[in-house]
Image (spheres, coloured by chain):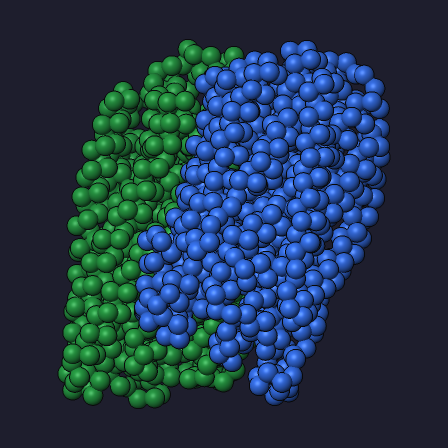
Chain colours: A green, B blue
């Protein structure tokens, strides 16, 4: 192992250290008045209770899956006992990252509200650095787990012929991603259902029926709503990107081990650790970026955005330079081309973020047209939002198409011969790593959003002065923009990561066949299996578009996406209806609430959201886990390959549609609230509130859950690859 | 040519003859009172004016495309001058069928209303047989065109080596389908925008703002609304299925010519004309079925449905028997297996129809749950509809997966070897033909819907007695059910047809390469091109899932689908807003309207819909036509193949989601109007009306237009195959 590898564990420790430092710094701040402490405590306890509940379910699922995997591995004669452990650590670290991030966020929001009593800059800095706790814990734990496993496996895995050792190591490590995916799915689906059941319930009865403002302490669902922001947006987003970060690095490492196998073990090692190093350096740059974020008192929203952007952009610019140095230093053949791939990935991320902003911010035409459609009623507003959302999905698809084309082309030196395929796919993988390398700081801007939102909620509930609320509102509005671009970023990176994973699926097919099933003597397209390339296996398994198994697979992939989104959508609808009934009941039976004399029963609403989320998250999640296995059992490798591509392509499009339509409705409502088309209380506003409510599960439940789905299904296929290779029915 | 082929032109003449007979029979009926005549005349003139406008645009597009195609064909050295003519006749006959069907429908509706003044049975028979005019004209003209071209080309195309003559003939004939597709796209998109702009506009101002009932003559948009039913649902649906019917027969013929090339010219001919014969016999059975539809006075909706079902089902049962005899008589190898494929296709059609009914009829849970969600407001109703719609898309996808698997497996005798691929794909094609063979009668039940709807409108506008309106309402309600199942049927057949077309795309690649580009000496996978199978070409062009061009193609296919649906959705939104403004203006400036003293300016609303449809239909349509060519120019054959599969899979899913969500909202509203959850005028009802309005462009514009899109894009790729083969950039 080259000495330079140890930059990875070092950067991991740096990240965790600074996370701890920011956390302690935040904890030293004052939490404000007693009322503020009480509200914050309510939210914190609700969130912790929910996470405990969720982890209980997840642990059971993990135990079951681990047993099944071990059994499958045993049944297939796979000697490797490391897989279940890698799987479990992936899930454990992901859960840990979500837990720490959520803790930090719930401790922070009250303190941010309090800091806003003094200054805007103080509030921004505190909120952002508390978000950075999440960002740095996520990247730190990923890098820690990766370096630990890489060192352990390097020591314990015996030497093998022809560079297979590194392939075996990276293949085992990839199952770490599967554990993280599973954890992330429950976090996103469960958290997403929780937060939107509470939000929709609170809005429908509170805003529309009772006519009280958002975050009014008289609304029984308001605590649940604030809890939801933390469990859905903080813990969910963290687990999501934990998984993307891990999977992009691990898949690229495996693709590197495969692509550079012919260059000898040293170059192969360099190709494997290159993505890890880029991620490590990106992490250090993220820490620097976090320190660059500050603003002055009385800053406009534009200035606030600029100060956040400065930190993020500086990290991105520096990683462009640093990644060139890494590739140059690692002496990879065509390092200049690979650097082009990384730049492509970064540019794609920026472009997707821009397109998200264009389609969802009220400064631009699309959202304004949706707001305008409110003048002819709710129906045209909804139609306009759906139409615009569908169109908006086309743009990131196009960006990803361009990105894939260029990332592949740069990495192969614009060669499209069969022999270049491996390098091209490594190029796509490393583009994803480039895009995600500064995750430490981009995730900080994501987690910042719900913290600012909750700070605003805290200020509202505690009736702090107008000036304070103006400050928290400014932070909150900024959070909405960063959340929208964050979602674009999450889905863009998920698509690239999923494609890299898909490529590693075929490497796994080959390894399973050659190594674990011990069939190297078999002829694959006339070549002994041991010498056959993964492309030979693609041909061997007839993974072409005229194979009905592939076609069937693609259709089933699209089916899974629609089924999954429909189920999560309906789950929110059902849970929200229960919440509406409960809030109505409390208003009806406890007349003191509206007069502000009786405290509403917040805990019951928290309980309803928790129960709803727990109950509703299981079936969609099991579908995601089981479909790849079942399709593998029936239609084999070609069926699974089609399935994955069907899921990735349609899931990506549907996710963006939902995220953008939801974001645009949200901002169209805010635009009207600024006084356009009659402003607050007008018929247009009522229509826009309904649009916003419809958009809630779009943008915060089904849309983001699809991000995980497209990665998890590939992961499940990768891990159970032996089933498709050995036992397929047709 | 075997004598049995002449069954095809004979059945065509029979179909056209009976269409004429039913038309004359209908025209002999009385059109009722002067008021009834006036209303019917308004609608008829509006519809005719619209079609004239539309055909004007379409003719220009046709001229441009024909010139481009001829140029492309010339530039590629294709000697065959028949292609542009086949293309033009396809478009011409499709337009003619739409025109006749629409004429019959607009003449019929007033007469149906009048017949309902006497008896329910009379009304049903008249409405249904007028719908049958459309059904029989469509199948008659398709079969006429096919037989004419088959005879002409057989005479004029010179003999070629190795059975290539039949492949050349069927390849040329396939471009007939492209003409029909282009025509259908404009009919569906233009008609869909027209009808929903009028409908949404009429509902939003009339029902919600002015509080007047549907089809009230005081509503200025009501005539436009009724015109819309005819141009959208009758002419649009007709052109759509004209295209599916033609394309499924022609693609299967080409696949048959390719699959059975090794069995000698006689067997090859049999394989080519077998799908034509099945369609011909299905047409005769459809005529018989039409005569079986009758009911007795005072029939319940269930009985009405049963009497329609009896005709349709008898035709289906008889075609199962007849198709066995055809295959047996044609002596095709494995005729029993191919028969299994046909039965599979028919069963899939029935199953998709059932699932559509389950998800959209108020007799079942899903729609009732949507209705129930209205109790917690518009937002939960919309969320529930979207969720249910998404889930409902999974079922037909699953059915098509099962159908493809079995149709393929039966046709190959459960062999999945490479050598069986051609037979399997022929099996999928013939399954589509089986599903569509009794189109004459299934289309009659589709066209029946809008006729009954318009009859109800006529009765309402002319203030006919309660008993009459009860009868027209019964017919109308039935029409809604048949329309929903008809849409399921249309989309199911579209998916199978598109897959058959996709397979023929590769046959065309091979032919283009070998015949027209004259490169038979080139080695394809080590085999001289002339001997290479189309599977060799699949491998040669690297049409596998790890080729980034294929992946890019799939993503672009999904992109096209989302862009296209978004554009059509927004088109309706914009046109509807203009309609709303106009209706509001008339109510405001002409106070006599609401008092019933002044006749509203119907013509202006008709004009607005017409102009909106014309203006808005061009861009989405051009996208559909251009994307396959552009992708071919950049990414070549693998890119186009991916594109088509991406479009088919995601387009299919999105189309069902939209059709079912729209249908379910519509029926949820009706369910509430029956007195549930507060009935008419309640808050629940208002929410349901909004849901219904949102669903209008879902189910009648974007959803059905996607049906055409998935076929047209394959067709455009088939016709411009030379571009991808010769000029691709990468």
Viewed as shown, does residue A715 lie left or right of A148? right
Looking at the rendering, which quadrant does residue B6 occupy?
top right
Above or below — where is B476 with respect to A163?
below
Q: Quadrant of the C terminus of chain A?
A: top left
Quarter of the image with the N terminus of chain A in it? top left
Could you say which is closer to the camera, residue B110 or residue A561? B110
Nearest to the observer: residue B626 or residue A480: B626
Depth check: B478 or B686 in front?
Answer: B478
* Residue A97 appears in the picture as rendered: no
List x then y, in percent, for residue B497.
Answer: 58, 36
Q: Position of residue A322 (x, y in %)?
A: 49, 50
Residue B396: x, y in percent?
Answer: 44, 41
Furthest residue to the front?
B118
Q: Is residue A667 above or below residue A289?
A: below
* Side (left or right) of B187 relative to B403: right
Residue B660, position as x, y percentages in the image: 46, 52
At 19% from the left and 45% from the top, the residue drawn is: A59
The total number of labels drawn is 0
| Residue B244 seen in this snapshot | yes
> A698 above or below B503?
below
As drawn, A306 above or below A539: below
Between B378 and B91, the one nearer to me in the picture: B91
Residue found 24% across the figure and 69% down from its top: A581
Tell me the residue at 29%/64% (across/down). A576
Residue at (20, 66) in percent of width and height: A606
């Amino acid at each position: 192992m080259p000495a330079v590898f140890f930059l990875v564990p070092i950067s991991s420790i740096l990240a965790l250290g600074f996370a701890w430092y920011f956390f302690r710094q935040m904890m030293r701040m004052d939490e404000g008045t007693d009322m503020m402490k009480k509200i914050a405590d309510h939210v914190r306890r609700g969130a912790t209770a929910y996470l405990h509940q969720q982890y209980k379910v997840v642990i059971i699922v993990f135990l079951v899956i681990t047993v099944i995997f071990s059994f499958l591995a045993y049944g297939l004669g796979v000697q490797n006992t490391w897989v279940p452990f890698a799987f479990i650590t992936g899930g454990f670290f992901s859960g840990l990252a979500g837990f720490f991030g959520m803790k930090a966020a719930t401790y922070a929001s009250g303190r941010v509200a309090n800091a806003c009593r003094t200054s805007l800059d103080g509030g921004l800095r505190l909120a952002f650095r508390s978000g950075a706790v999440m960002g740095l814990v996520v990247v730190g734990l990923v890098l820690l787990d990766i370096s630990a496993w890489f060192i352990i496996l390097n020591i314990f895995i015996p030497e093998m012929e022809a560079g297979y050792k590194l392939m075996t190591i990276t293949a085992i490590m990839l199952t770490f991603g599967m554990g993280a995916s599973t954890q992330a799915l429950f976090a996103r689906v469960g958290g997403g259902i929780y937060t939107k059941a509470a939000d929709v319930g609170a809005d429908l009865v509170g805003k529309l029926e009772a006519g009280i403002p958002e975050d009014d302490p008289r609304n029984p669902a308001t605590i649940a709503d604030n809890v939801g922001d933390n469990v859905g947006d903080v813990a969910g987003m963290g687990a999501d990107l934990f998984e993307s970060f891990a999977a992009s690095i691990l898949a690229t490492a495996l693709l590197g081990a495969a692509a550079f196998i012919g260059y000898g073990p040293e170059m192969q090692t360099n190709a494997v650790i290159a993505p890890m190093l880029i991620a490590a350096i990106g992490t250090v740059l993220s820490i620097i970026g976090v320190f660059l974020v500050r603003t002055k008192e009385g800053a406009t929203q534009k200035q606030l955005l600029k100060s956040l952007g400065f930190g993020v952009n500086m990290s991105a610019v520096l990683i462009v330079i640093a990644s060139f140095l890494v590739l140059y230093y690692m002496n990879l053949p065509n390092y200049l081309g690979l650097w082009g791939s990384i730049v492509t990935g970064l540019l794609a991320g920026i472009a997707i973020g821009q397109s998200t902003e264009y389609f969802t911010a009220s400064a631009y035409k699309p959202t304004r047209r949706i707001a305008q459609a409110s003048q002819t009623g709710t129906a045209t507003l909804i139609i306009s939002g759906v139409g615009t959302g569908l169109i908006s999905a086309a743009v990131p698809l196009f960006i990803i198409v361009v990105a894939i084309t260029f990332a592949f082309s740069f990495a192969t030196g614009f060669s499209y011969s069969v022999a270049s395929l491996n390098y091209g796919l490594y190029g796509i993988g490393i583009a994803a790593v480039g895009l995600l390398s500064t995750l430490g700081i981009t995730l900080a801007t994501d987690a910042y959003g719900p913290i600012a939102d909750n700070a605003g909620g805290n200020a509202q509930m505690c009736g702090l002065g107008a000036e304070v609320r103006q400050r928290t509102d400014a932070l909150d509005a900024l959070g909405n923009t960063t959340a929208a671009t964050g979602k674009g970023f999450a889905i863009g990176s998920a698509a690239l990561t999923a494609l890299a994973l898909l490529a590693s699926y075929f490497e796994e097919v080959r390894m399973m066949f050659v190594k674990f099933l011990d069939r190297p003597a078999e002829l694959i397209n006339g070549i002994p299996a041991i010498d056959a390339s993964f492309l030979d296996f693609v041909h061997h398994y007839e993974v072409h578009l005229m194979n009905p198994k592939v076609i069937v697979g693609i259709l089933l992939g699209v089916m899974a996406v629609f089924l999954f989104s429909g189920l999560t959508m309906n789950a929110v609808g059902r849970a929200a209806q229960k919440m509406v009934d409960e809030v109505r009941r409390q208003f009806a039976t406890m007349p003191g609430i509206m007069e502000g004399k009786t405290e509403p029963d917040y805990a019951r609403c928290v309980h309803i959201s928790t129960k709803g989320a727990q109950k509703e998250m299981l079936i969609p999640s099991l579908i995601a886990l089981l479909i790849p296995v079942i399709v593998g059992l029936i239609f084999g490798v070609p069926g699974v390959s089609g399935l994955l591509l069907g899921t990735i392509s349609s899931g990506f499009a549907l996710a963006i549609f939902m995220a953008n339509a939801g974001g645009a409705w949200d901002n169209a409502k805010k635009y009207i609230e600024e006084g356009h088309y009659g402003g607050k209380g007008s018929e247009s506003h009522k229509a826009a509130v309904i649009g916003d409510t419809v958009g809630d599960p779009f943008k915060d439940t089904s849309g983001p859950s699809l991000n995980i789905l497209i990665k998890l299904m590939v992961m499940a296929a990768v891990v159970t690859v032996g089933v498709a290779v050995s036992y397929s029915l047709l």
